[in-house]
Image (tube, rainbow, N blue to C red):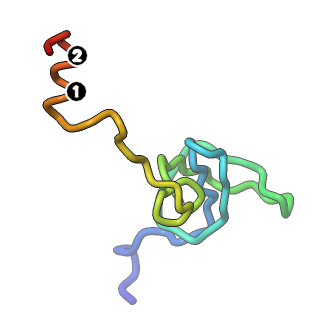
Amino acid sequence: MKEGIHPEYRKVVFLDTSSDFKFLSGSTKYSDETIEWEDGNTYPLIRVEISSESHPFYTGKQKTDTVGGRVDRFKKKYNMK
């Protein structure tokens, strides 16, 4: 590999902010935040909004809209019959 053109690859902790699920993985992402992991070492912390712990595909919990269609919601919002 050419020297000086590749980002640093290191271990980082990803934190799913919606479920507080953490996992350690390798990445080139950079962060000023750090966290102490279970092994006693300190790693950079990357916050993510969704992971396998909270994604509907992996959890099997799909959100369903039981209120009705778009028109029904519009009418309900503006008190139309």
Dot 2: element: helix
Name the residue carrying label 2. Answer: 77
Callout 2, which amino acid? Lys
Residue at the image point whose x is 48% and y is 57% from the top: 56
CB within 8 Å, label 1 to label 2: yes
Residue 73 is labelled as 1
- Closer to us: 11 or 47: 47
Q: Is residue 66 above or below residue 15?
A: above
Tell me how many marks there are. Answer: 2
81 relative position to 4: left or right = left
- Closer to us: 74 or 51: 74
Q: Quadrant of the N terminus?
A: bottom left
Residue at the image point whose x is 49% and y is 69% from the top: 8
Position in image of residue 62 (x %, y %): 45, 54
Q: Residue furthest top?
A: 79
Callout 1, which amino acid? Arg
- Closer to us: 80 or 2: 80
Quarter of the image for residue 32 reads: top right
Residue at the image point whose x is 57% and y is 49% from the top: 16
Q: Is residue 58 above or below residue 73?
A: below
Q: Residues within 10 Å of mark 2 (few under 14, many from 20)?
A: few
Position in image of residue 78 (x %, y %): 17, 12
8 relative position to 42: left or right = left
Q: Is residue 73 above or below residue 8?
A: above
Position in image of residue 40 (x %, y %): 86, 58
- Closer to us: 57 or 74: 74
Q: Is residue 76 above or below residue 30?
A: above
